[in-house]
Image (cartoon, rainbow, N blue to C red):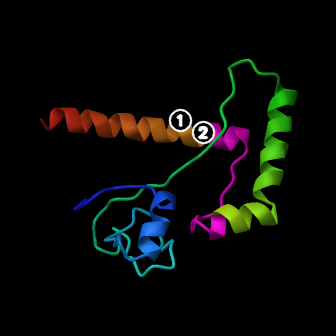
Amino acid sequence: MDCGISALAPMVGLLKSKDLRLLASTATEPETDQDVPTFLEKKLDVTGNMSRGIAVKKGTPPQMIEKLHATFKSAISSPEWKENYIDKFQQRQGYLGPADFTKAMKDEERVTREFLKTVAKSK
């Protein structure tokens, strides 16, 4: 492959083996032990992040949502999570509760919809 865009985690092995070189990151601050500039440092307004979350069916009882929230928050606070995921794949740790994550996803959807409108008009 000559060039590609990917999340960081699947590429860590290739980076460490030197079979792949990162040119820039969409993070707003450096995020790896590799010496990789961000697009912002290159004076390009390209940022992004990778969000992962758990979705439940609309109408799920609040007590079930709270139980899931507490379980996942506990799991990502564990030393095993840090060692086997955060450190191993050079990830940034972050956590949003149900209300904040819902808001973040709605905001991301709004921004993405606006961006896609501009792409469609540029053809």
Are the residues tagged 1 and 2 within 8 Å (C-beta)?
yes
Observer-nearest of 59 and 89? 89
**Which numbered marker is on residue 106?**
1
Q: Quadrant of residue 101?
A: top right
Magenta stretch, residue numbers? 86-103
- Rendered position, 94 above or below 56: below
Q: Is residue 81 magenta-colored?
A: no
Q: Is residue 65 visible?
A: yes
Identity of the amino acid at label 1?
Answer: Lys
**Lateral position of residue 40 relative to residue 119, left or right:** right
Residue at horizontal 68%, vertical 21%? 57
Point 87% across, 29% down: residue:
63
Instruction: Look at mark 2 in the image and give the residue it sits on.
Output: 103
In the rendered view, does 31 fall on the left or right side of 61?
left
**Amino acid type, callout 2:** Lys
Local SS, label 2:
helix
- Residue at far bottom of view: 35
47 relative to 2 in the view: left or right = right
